[in-house]
Amino acid sequence: MLNILLLTVLIVPLAMSRPLLLLQDQFDLPKLLTLRLFLLSIVVLWSGKILITERVKFRWSRFDLALVGFLALALISSIFSIHFPTAIHGRYERYEGLLTLISYGLLYFFAVQVFSDFGRVSRLNKAIIISGGLVALYGLLQYFGLDPLPWTGVPFEERRSFATFGNPDLLAGFLVLVIPLSLAEFLRAGNKRDSLWIGFSLFLVFACLLTAFTRSAWIGAAGSLLAFMVLGGRAVFSDIRRLLAISLLFVSIFALLAVFSISSGHTVTNLFARIKSTTQITEGSAAQRLEIWKAGSQMISDNALLGSGPDTFRLASGNYETLEFVKMTQGMTVADNAHNYIIQLAATVGVPAVLLLMLFLAAAIFISIKSMRKTGAPERLVSAGLLSAIFGYLIYLLLGLSVVGSSSVFWILCGALVSATTTARNTAIDFQGARTASIKAAVAMLVLFSAISAYFALAMFRADYHYSRALFLSTAGDPNATIISYEKAIGLYKNGKYYDDYGAYLEKAGWEYGNYDLTSSSISILRDAVRFEPEEADHYIYLANTVLQSTSNPNAPELVYAEQVLNAAILKRANSIPARVILAQVMFNQNRYSDAVPILQFVLNMSPDHINGNLLMAQCLERLGNNQEALRFYRKLLSLQPEHREAKASIQRLQGEAD
């Protein structure tokens, strides 16, 4: 089990599909599958040993019951969730549903069994340091424009490292875990070789943390380093020369990157500007997160006991997003995560579950700090590294996101902390009479759970391959092969994104090939999306828009149906701008101009520069005979898009009529 756990922390953070395999989710899904396959291997080995020896031996702590209680409440929350499939599997590209939460719990349990001495914990640290160094090296290659893999259309600023995590924020969360472990092992390195390779890895990790330009991770790393100094005490300062060397290295890296980053021409990738923005909590992404927290707090207030179900934040948050958030994002973004792990969990699995989890973590940290007093200097450094890594990651989670690539390592570290630095108890149970059947049943259930989890991860992996292939084929002019790939993807892993993209492709292909059957199939697929995930407003919006495009008759019953669908979307997401714009278009097509105007007023109050909103408002006002007001909106549209033909023609026409 030791070697498999070491491989887990080594390989899971590195896992990604590119360039080996075509996947749409190239980062999180490979990590999920790798984790669950390793976990299945551990469970099978442990269970086999139990059945052969006919004896159960395990280590545990008295506060483990709080973690068990958390997982039990997460199970109950899943059963009563607003969307059971999401609660079980998690959101696409997140995957922190019930199966993953239980997987974290099992990682913790097996880490407690394995890392019972500081020698083994040191091996764990070094495996994480190797993984962190490799991840950081790739991230730095990206920052300096030396990435051997071409990436296009990344949804963040250029010259930000994202490495094997696909996102700078997620990468930085993992690096927060690595830094204190690297520092602990560097300070206690017993030979020159270890000092060199660990020091070099620490150099890479610190540099990459800076080039990710993630403020939440910087705060977490600063907190972890401060905790390391306090917890390590005299052991940290036992080798002043080595400490000064690493401090000088940190200062040099920071100074060099700070000067180099000035040339980026962007405030996000300018190190000094980014640090300064850390205090500006009422602007930019920080202000958006405050609004998301307000929505999350209201969600907690309305369903404090069990929440909406694990990883269902996006589905539940539609009716809670604030008007200020809609204004900030122009209605183009839906929060799929609270960006605060306490709010995220409280909103999705309930307040009692979060209190149990916090109790578990607080007890583990408190008892571990107490036990550190009895250890010598080398062991104290190891304990300080573990505690600081956990502490720093928890700080990061108050502002960031939990993902498989980093949280799996976090829970293994929690198990190592409890096993090596607290008074973990040893228990042995022999197979006897009635116990035999119950123990075998429990072992069989554990193996079955791990096998099912691995199976689902593999099915999701295969589904994403077919989904990615469908996206590729859709540009190659092969509709039959594209449809087959979409059908295979949905058959393996029903997912709202797959449905929406499948429906969008069928609509596009229907227009392109003049085949109404494809358009009809598109509507059918989007109806399936609504039935599968009824809390997702986007499905209703895509369905209504497709129905709208299918007819030009103002009296067509399809338009009445589209209006009903859009009203349902607004019930799911009260402040939805896209739903209202399409609803106004439906009313415009029905010649109901006066009904469309107040809807468009809401849209333009939230998003004054909305192109279609301004165009529709101008057209409705013109049809109502209010030419002066229509001219105002046409002119606003022209200021937004100076080459907009319809705006130019309409202004010229209305001015000519006025003359």
Image: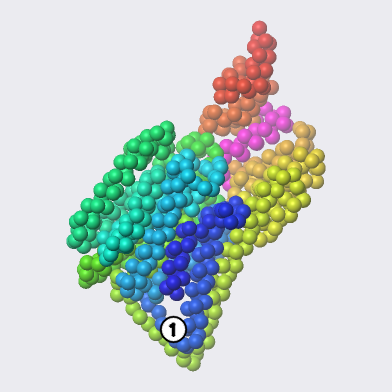
Q: Main secondary structure of the magenta part?
A: helix
Which amino acid is tagged 1?
A: Val
Where's the C terminus, which quadrant?
top right
Name the residue at the top extreme: 659
Q: Which residue is mark 1?
A: 56
Q: Name above or below for residue 255 compared with residue 121.
A: above
Q: Quadrant of residue 455?
A: bottom right
- Residue at (64, 18) in percent of width and height: 648
Q: Is residue 235 visible?
A: yes
Q: Position of residue 42 (x, y in %)?
A: 49, 73
Q: As drawn, which residue projects farthest toward the bottom?
A: 433
Q: In screen coordinates, is 183 left or right of 13?
A: left
The answer to whether 230 is drawn above or below residue 476 in the figure is below
Toward which corner of the image does residue 634 lie, by quadrant? Answer: top right
Q: Is residue 177 above or below residue 68?
A: above
* Residue 188: % across, % down: 26, 63
Q: Which span of residues is magenta-colored?
A: 572-595
